[in-house]
């Protein structure tokens, strides 16, 4: 049974505070950032800084969930762009291993080899279960781009797993 | 695998990995417009625990290595003040201030220094196909000291990380005393060092092996830790204190050193050479104690460790356990070493048993062409692939124990350990008794062929 780890929309009632939003959504955003960057340490930093930036601009009662998610994803991209030369796939190797299930280990290793954008699309589609439209809105691209990126990513995953 | 199966496998992996993340405790940042962000120590309690004097050498070595011709593996170094209580701790460089609107300086990946010349592996642990550590002996001014190496590419290249500043005695290199390294994930690991008096010292690292600190032996300073293993974000050890009536099992979340005792205990037996083995796979686990014969065991389940009768309890000999999955367990029994053997077997034989119900029941398969293997292993998810480590060779079966073949010969020593990380990748260690000479081999094809690991 999958745990419901989707960032929830904040109830749009007066009196919602950023403390409540942080409490409700921080951990799930850290997990999202971890799946994209491969590092819990980096994920925590990126999420913390995302909250700092978003808090300065957004009213918490206005359902900041999708905005936070988009900001975290963008922060992950920025981080990858700056560290592209050094990190390669190192971070995804240095991370907690959830299971000795060999299929999961191989799948996780294969995900590590995907380009960041492909990995991000797969995480948004199959971890958060977002629709293609929601993925497109998160990434700021067209639905067609999401479809093609997802298709290429799955094709590459299959190629690596069947090698 | 069709598309639906691939998607489902992907979903399982993503959710499993995400659920393994335990975000460190944090409070909401204070809301502010544009303020200069104060130096923010990394909240790396998971990565930066107390440091030993080894960190000075490790830090210097990392800086030194930047100027070297590199082929070592790389490690991510988080720069932040060390906040450990160890009074001998050196302080890592602090991160610099940054404006509130910019993302803080991310972790920097730096190459590791080369492994010290003369490194002799004694214990190896892998947490994934790529990431592993080897503990070994290295020549030092006091004789032989502990060295620790790490790989991030599945064992092709290794680099040196920190190590407890300990001189190894002859007893550590041979005999019942020993030294073991185990990691639970990329950051959290332990070293168990047992001295000639059979007292065990425990060291932990929470930064991938860069630094190590002593941790109180949860069973007391005079206790021996028979085994320590980690899985599913938890570490477990089994120990025995002099004068105690039974062995105790202790567990801790991998990110901390908060060892708590299980209610279940294991009889130590009346013999003179007690030992215990822990086998973990995901959330499941088994431990069996041997003191000439099987004396008892425990099984790890949703309710924690509970009493369990291991296989071979009536074989009057030792037992070795391994697991391919949470339900598929393999055991080899030393038949009739200290009494009658089990029906259908002959004294002196090593007999293979398998379970498909998590160890509740076992079925006899047949004899194994070795006697008293030091260690057995079964490939993850592939219960038909079994490898046994014995004296001067590794023997493997690829049909669930129906037939066996020698898959590797020792160069000069005795195989002391064999283990699989995945369905295809595993390692084995051999040691030459009475010397510091040892070697390690690795397989990438499910145990069929083994090649030396070059550190």
Image (cartoon, coloured by chain):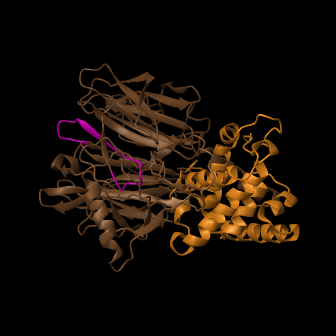
Chain colours: A orange, B brown
In screen coordinates, is B155 left or right of B202? right
User: What's the residue at 22%, 45% (across, down)?
Assistant: B175
In this view of the protein, which residue sits in the foreground, B87 or B206?
A: B87
Q: State left or right for residue B97 relative to residue B360.
A: left
Q: Quadrant of the N terminus of chain B?
A: bottom right
Q: Which residues are magenta?
A: B194-211
Residue A27 inside the magenta-drawn segment: no
Q: Is residue A116 visible?
A: yes
Q: Residue at x 30, y 34 (%)?
A: B216
Q: Classify the position of the C terminus of chain B by image quarter.
A: bottom left
At x 60%, y 60%, the residue is B101
Residue B224: percent from the left, percent from the top? 28, 34
Q: Main secondary structure of the magenta part?
A: loop
Question: Where is residue B324 drawn, in percent x and y?
Answer: 56, 47
Give above or below for B200 relative to A142.
above
Residue A155 relative to residue A85: left or right? right
Residue B257's spot in the image, x, y percent? Answer: 40, 37
When the figure is inspected, residue B276 is found, relative to residue A157, above or below; the finding is above
Q: Position of residue B385 (x, y in %)?
A: 54, 54
Q: Relative to B3, does residue B319 appear above or below in the rendering? A: above
- The answer to whether any part of residue B174 appears in the image is no
- In the figure, residue A126 lies in which quadrant? bottom right
């Amino acid at each position: 049974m999958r745990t419901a780890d989707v960032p929830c929309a904040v109830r749009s009632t007066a009196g919602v505070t950023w403390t409540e939003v942080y409490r409700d959504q921080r951990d799930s955003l850290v997990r999202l950032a971890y799946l994209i960057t491969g590092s819990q340490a980096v994920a925590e930093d990126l999420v913390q800084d995302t909250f700092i930036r978003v808090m300065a601009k957004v009213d918490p009662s206005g359902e900041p969930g999708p905005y936070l998610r988009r900001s975290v994803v963008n922060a992950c991209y920025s981080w990858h762009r700056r560290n592209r030369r050094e990190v390669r796939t190192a971070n995804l190797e240095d991370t907690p291993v959830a299971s000795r299930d060999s299929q999961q280990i191989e799948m996780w290793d294969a995900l590590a080899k995907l380009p960041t954008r492909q990995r991000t699309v797969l995480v948004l589609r199959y971890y958060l279960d977002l629709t293609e439209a929601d993925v497109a809105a998160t990434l700021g691209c067209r639905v067609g781009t999401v479809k093609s990126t997802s298709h290429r990513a799955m094709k590459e995953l299959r190629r690596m797993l069947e090698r | 695998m069709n598309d639906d199966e691939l998607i489902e496998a992907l979903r399982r992996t993503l959710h499993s990995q995400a659920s393994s993340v335990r975000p460190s405790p944090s409070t909401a940042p204070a809301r502010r417009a544009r303020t200069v962000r104060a130096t923010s120590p990394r909240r790396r309690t998971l990565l930066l625990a107390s440091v030993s004097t080894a960190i000075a050498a490790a830090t210097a070595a990392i800086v030194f290595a930047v100027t070297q011709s590199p082929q070592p593996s790389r490690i991510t170094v988080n720069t932040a003040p060390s906040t450990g209580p160890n009074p001998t701790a050196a302080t890592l460089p602090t991160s610099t201030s940054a404006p509130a609107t910019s993302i803080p300086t991310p972790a920097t990946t730096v190459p590791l220094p080369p492994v010290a010349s003369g490194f002799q592996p004694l214990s190896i642990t892998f947490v994934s196909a790529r990431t592993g550590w080897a503990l070994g002996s290295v020549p030092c001014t006091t004789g032989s000291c502990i060295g620790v190496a790490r790989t991030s590419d599945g064992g092709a290249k290794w680099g040196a990380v920190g190590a407890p500043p300990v001189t190894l005695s002859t007893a550590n290199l041979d005999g019942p005393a020993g030294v073991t390294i185990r990691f639970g994930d990329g950051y959290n690991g332990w070293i168990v060092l047992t001295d000639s008096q059979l007292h065990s010292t425990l060291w932990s690292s929470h930064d991938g092996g860069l630094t190590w600190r002593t941790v109180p032996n949860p069973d007391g300073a005079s206790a021996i830790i028979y085994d320590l293993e980690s899985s599913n974000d938890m570490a477990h050890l089994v120990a025995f204190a002099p004068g105690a009536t039974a062995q105790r099992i202790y567990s801790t979340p991998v990110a901390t050193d908060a060892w708590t005792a299980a209610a279940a205990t294991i009889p130590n037996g009346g013999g003179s050479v007690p030992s215990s083995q822990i086998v973990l796979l995901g959330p499941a686990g088994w431990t069996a104690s041997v003191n000439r014969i099987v004396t008892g065991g425990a099984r790890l389940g949703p309710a924690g460790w509970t009493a369990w009768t291991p296989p071979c309890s009536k074989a009057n000999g030792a037992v070795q356990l391994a697991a391919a999955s949470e339900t598929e367990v393999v055991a080899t029994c030393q038949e009739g070493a200290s009494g009658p053997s089990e029906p259908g077997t002959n004294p002196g034989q090593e007999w293979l048993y398998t379970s498909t119900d998590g160890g509740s029941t076992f079925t006899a398969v047949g004899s194994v062409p070795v006697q008293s293997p030091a260690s057995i292993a079964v490939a993850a998810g592939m219960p038909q692939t079994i490898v046994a480590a014995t004296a001067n060779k590794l023997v493997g079966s690829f049909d669930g124990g129906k037939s066996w073949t020698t898959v590797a010969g020792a160069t000069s020593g005795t195989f002391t350990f064999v283990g699989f990380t995945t369905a295809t990748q595993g390692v084995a260690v051999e040691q030459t008794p009475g010397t510091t000479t040892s070697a390690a081999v690795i397989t990438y094809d499910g145990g069929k062929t083994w090649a030396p690991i070059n550190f």
